[in-house]
Amino acid sequence: MTASSKALPRISVQQEEHEDPREHLMLDPKPRGEMNAMVMESMHTTSWKFWVVTAILSIIVAVCLFGAWGYLIAEGMGVAGINRPDYWGIFIVDTVFWIGISHAGTFVSALLRVFKAEFRRPFTRAAELMTTFGLVQAGLSIFMHLGRVWLAYWMMPYPNERGLWPDLHSPLMWDFLAINTYLLCSTMYLFLPLIPDLAMARDRSTGWRKIFYRTLSLGFRGTEGEWTHLKNAMNIFAWAILPVMFSVHTIVSWDFAMATRPGWSSTIFGPYFVIGALHSGLAAVVMVLFVIRSTMKHMKYFIRPEHFDALGKLMLVISMCWAYFFFNDYIVQWYGGDQWTKILLAFHEQAPQSYIYFTMLICNIVVPWLTLWNRKVRRTPWLMFIIGLLINVGMWLERYVIIPMTLTINRMPFTWRVYHPGIEIPLGIGTLAFFILLYMLASRVIPLVPVWEVQEGQMAHTLRKVGKARVKTVSEID
Amino acid sequence: MSETKTLLALFQDLDPAADAIDKLKEMGLTEDQVNVISGIPVLERILGRPVQWTNVPRLAFGGAIAGFIIGLLLAFSPATYPALIAGGQPLVPVPPSIIVVFEMTMLGMLLSTFIGVFLDSSFPSYRPMEYIPEISDGKIAVFFACPADEEKKFVSAMKKLGAESVQPAEAQQL
Amino acid sequence: MDTTTKTPESGAQQDTVTQGKWGMVIDQDLCTGCQACVAACAMENNISFVGEEDVNYGRSMHWIRIERFWQGSYPDVKMTPYQPVTCQQCHKAPCEPVCPVFASLHSEAEDLNLQVYNRCIGTRYCANNCPYQVRAFNWRDWVRPDPLSNQLNPDVTVRRRGVMEKCTFCIQRIRKVEDTAESENRDIRDGEVVPACAQACPANAIVFGRIDDPTTAVSKLTNSSRGSKLLEDLGTLPRITYLKGA
């Protein structure tokens, strides 16, 4: 260090200036034919390890999901861990968790598209698949929770000889409408941008695959008319599915907020749950992207550290939003809540189940806040996988705290009782295995990367000299 | 009118394709007689083409109205028969009805958007159609109908502008 | 006060009052905590035999429970009055609007909260929303050990697994008295309808009757200065008044 103060300390040169622009997918274009071949090859190349994992998952699904569920239906809810006053347990936790995961797809596919975040291009479909399969698991979980699931169709508004309609006063009916709307709309939104890629797959397939893709691609060729209708529809979907997404998890939160229970009757639940959904959803996207990148051929070209970097930044921001909403809910109850709410807060923080509460806080706040600041961490896929996993664990525990743990405390102390899960654990594992299984099977027939969107983005990106630097520019050609 | 022949000129890139379309207009073809098939959506103004019509936004709006009406019917009519009282709330409360109407409106809008794409593009269509598989590999195909006797003139004009191939367009099973 | 009521079925006006609004008074100072009401209710309403394991885990099916609390710790323990808690038949019941299939309803004529067993699909939202936690869910198909199956009350249905149930103010007894009164073309007399719990109580701590008639014993006790409602500040407007204190 010089004693002279004339020279200001030099700021170290930013790493980005020396970065090879071809590190960015958008600035590293490959001929479309080559990218198509890569995606097709990653679909077709299936190693024996894939089949082993599929077999194991199938067994888990058969035993833990369908077998255990049959037992549950035959024996009744008694084999689960629910009781008075914890009438809702891990089934509902799983339902809310899977719906949260499903919001990831819409976030990536719609919100990022609306904000023209170019980095979304290679993984919109991978995320949208998570939405559809996550909603399947949510649906299964909610059916598992019903006492008389064989009569679940009574929630459908259909004319019948009894003249009975479902009760639209009930938040569960709003759930029914909202989740079904969301499932239909997000599946349509998955399908629309998939059509051109199915056409590409049709052009490059033979045998049963060709028949499959030909049927599903509906005769798409790529004429100006077809593209215009498709792009228009995708635009409408991207904007419209955002309020649907927000409304779905808000309505799910209203299952709790409409109730008169201490700890549940909170006005912040709507946005709190939406942010929670985005939190766990984005973490799940990162996990899925890591697995795809590591296990599927050629995916390292499409999914790069820059994507984990961008998602990591989003995860950090959403983690802060989550902490804001959590603290909002907490301090209002702590400061001005009635005696039952205060007892509830104390219960959360004290043994014997307080480890759940504190693990939740550590995983949702401490882990992202300590790690996601660092650019190097964000650009390391396996580290992001672990952070994503911890966040998902934390968010699952958050729903556990909100549902069975909060139900333990109510205004009639004589009824307080702690919840201990029973058959919910194997059933929950079954839904997770089913999700992974569906995803793995889908990866064999559905092109996971929307190549036309990647090429579109690559065409729009150029390097331009501005002053002494070469900077990335994006033109609006869509 | 003399017979017309439909030709498909395949181009590697957007710039020669744009020049080719200009040339075709120069050679007397109207916008209707020219079609562009591509592997990515190309903005019409890049190729100097008129903006394509689409009914999808109108259908979406219509679907939203239909969904709105269905939501109103769902929220306000069934509950009145039979009169089932629940929890001191009015028979047809307004706040829950807002939720129902909102969801049905969005569902109507998005369902009709989706169906609109099918209707406008005549999906699904499994008839044989003019197509070259290389289009999904990123090539741009300019598809036009020219008078049969001038075919050679058009073919050479396209080739001069850089067309990879100019073939008579045959409808084939996709 | 309107003494004529329109029954939903016939739509006809009736001169005699064969349907009233029902209420209950429980005197906690008289209650000895003997649980005779619990046993009587279980026998009257065909409540399942749950077993020790499930009851320990909070799955008792009793429609009425005696809550006991105490102050202080041994050896200076002071008992507080026993609190029999049953369905409060709230006028603004939180359990009603949350049922997605209309299985939890309100009877306008009798001001009772109705649970329709056939319609229940087991979402258990009603039980979560009940601030008094008086609803019982059929977690299993419990076996009724012989010869106790001979003790079933033919006036009351038996519920399967997956269905929610709760105290009905012995609506089967109310109906019986209403039918009898209608066929005899007279008013229901005060004290004619006796639910099982009131019938069994040795201390006469439970009084039941029409609270829309100011001359009944129940109405007089409801207005007593010792009277209060459970969780009154929630605004559920329960039909049961608890008498406690000097």
Image (cartoon, grey):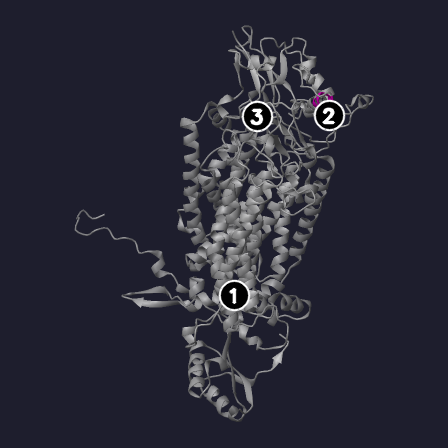
- Residue A385 visible? The answer is no
Residue at image mark 1? A451
How far apart are labels 2 and 3 at the CA level?
A: 25 Å
Figure check: C97 above or below A288: above
Does the magenta-highlighted stretch encompass residue C182? yes
Question: Mark 1: which amino acid?
Answer: Val
Question: Mark 3: which amino acid?
Answer: Cys
Same subunit, labels 1 and 3: the answer reads no
Please state the extent of the stretch shown in magenta in the rendering.
Answer: C178-183
Q: Residues within 10 Å of mark 1 (few under 14, many from 20)?
A: many
For marks 2 and 3 on the same chain, the one whose residue lies earlier in the sequence: 2
Chain under label 3? C
Q: Residues within 10 Å of mark 3 (few under 14, many from 20)?
A: many
- Residue C29 visible? The answer is yes
Same subunit, labels 2 and 1: the answer reads no
The quarter of the image holding the N terminus of chain C is top right
How far apart are labels 2 and 1 at the CA level?
A: 62 Å
Chain under label 2? C
Instruction: Please name whichever residue, A162 or C160, is drawn nearer the observer in this view of the structure.
Output: A162
**Relative to B53, C94 lies left or right:** right
Does the magenta-highlighted stretch encompass residue A224? no
Instruction: Please name whichever residue, A203 or C142, is drawn nearer the observer in this view of the structure.
Output: C142
Q: Which residue is at 47% across, 61% downward?
A: A235
Question: Across the whole image, how many numbered discs are drawn on residues?
Answer: 3
Same subunit, labels 2 and 3: the answer reads yes
> Looking at the image, do the residues carrying marks 2 and 1 touch, with CB atoms under 8 Å apart?
no
Q: Nearer the viewer, mark 2 or mark 1?
A: 2
**Where is residue C224 shown, x and y percent of the image?**
53, 11
Tag 3 secondary structure: loop
Residue at image mark 3? C90
